[in-house]
Image (tube, grey):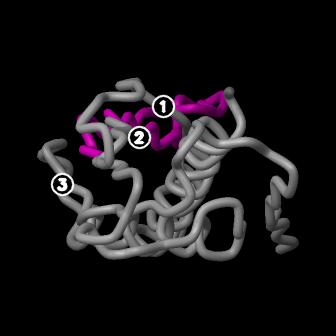
Amino acid sequence: MISFSCNYSFKGASPPEGIRTIYIPGILDQSSFSQANLGENMTVMLKNKFIKDHTLEYAEKTSADGMLTCVIKSVTDEPLVVSGNEQVSKRKITITVSADFQNLKKSKAIWKKNFSNWGDYESSSGGFSKRDDGINSAMDKVTDDILLDVISNW
């Protein structure tokens, strides 16, 4: 199996004026999807993307200029490919996250948006380990979308 990974770097991107540091509290999981540590895993993934990107410096809340609060609103797992004998061979995991980006120095909201993206996995074999692949793919894509929106849509 071949796996591709993209590392984004948006050098030269311009975040909102006055925002040089960012704090990301733990992501709450309100999805009721049965996946342990989903919020924790997404928090780590998102923080690491901001740290690797270097557009904004990661800081604790007491010293940060901006704060990005995220909540996992829904996770769906649905058939994507059905074979001729009506067996599901591939499934699709979709994760929807509500994100609230705030300027802590001005006590002002910058934006509040929903982000949604998906990943797929083979369902004919592998069980939950393959489902984890789909979840990780969806988390990777949705956290990329959030990072891009924070640092470059100005």
Q: Kindly indicate whether the residue at mark 3 contacts the one at mark 1 (C-beta within 8 angstroms).
A: no
For the C terminus, which image quadrant?
top right
In this rendering, the label closer to the viewer, 2 or 3: 3
Is disc 1 placed on a helix, strand or loop?
Answer: strand
**What's the amino acid at mark 1?**
Ser
x, y percentage for residue 63? Answer: 33, 70
Q: Give x and y (percent) for residue 28.
A: 18, 54
Residue 81 colored in magenta in the image: yes
Which quadrant, please, contains the N terminus? bottom right
Count of numbered labels shown in the rendering: 3
Residue 60 lies in quadrant: bottom left
**104 up-or-down from 53: above or below:** above
Part of the protein shown in magenta: 70-99
- Which of labels 1 and 3 is toward the front? 3
Q: Give whichever of discs 1 and 3 has the lower sequence position.
A: 3
> CB of mark 2 within 8 Å of CB of mark 3?
no
Q: Return the mark for residue 39.
A: none
Q: Residue 116: which disc?
A: 1
